Amino acid sequence: MRRISDSICANARRHGGPGQSPADRADRRSAGANVPEGAILLARRLGPAELLDWHARGIAGVAVEEASPSGHAAILARALGIPAVGSLRGMLDSANRATMPW
């Protein structure tokens, strides 16, 4: 299972996911180029493709409101070694927006 996960992750990083042109991938990378080192991504929901995008931008971890330990993004986060926590209902409502630069 681990080898399959590693292979999928490596392939997705190389090709940027299905249906994306090279220009689309470049736009997505530059849009997140200002992610501060050590940033923790806060999200209501997070899919595996989005996680790969944010991982490529350099996030240090993720906190997701609507997630489960058996979800696809959680499995991928474990395979990539990204610290992740989920099922944090209300997290975004109580986050201090002044400390979120992007």
Image: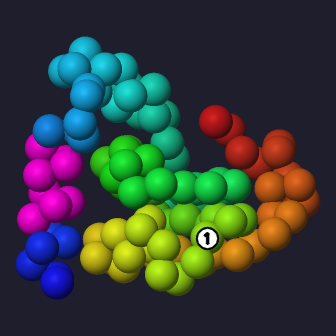
The kind of secondary structure the magenta stretch mainly shows is helix
The magenta stretch spans residue 10: yes
**Can residue 5 be seen in the rendering of this structure?**
yes
Label 1 crowding class (10 Å Cα cut-off): few <14, some 14-19, many 20+?
A: many
The quarter of the rendered structure image containing the N terminus is: bottom left
Q: Which residue is mark 1?
A: 67
Q: Quadrant of residue 19?
A: top left
The magenta stretch spans residue 45: no
Q: Residue at x 55, y 65 (%)?
A: 62
Q: Residue at x 19, y 72 (%)?
A: 5
Span highlighted in magenta in the image: 7-14
51 sits to left or right of 10: right
Nearer to the camera, 68 or 31: 68
**Can residue 26 be seen in the rendering of this structure?**
no
Q: Residue at x 68, y 38 (%)?
A: 101
Q: Secondary structure at mark 1?
A: loop
Three-letter code for the amino acid on which mark 1 is drawn: Ala
100 sits to left or right of 52: right
Model colouring:
rainbow
Coordinates of residue 84 in the picture (x, y in percent): 52, 74
Nearer to the camera, 81 or 44: 44
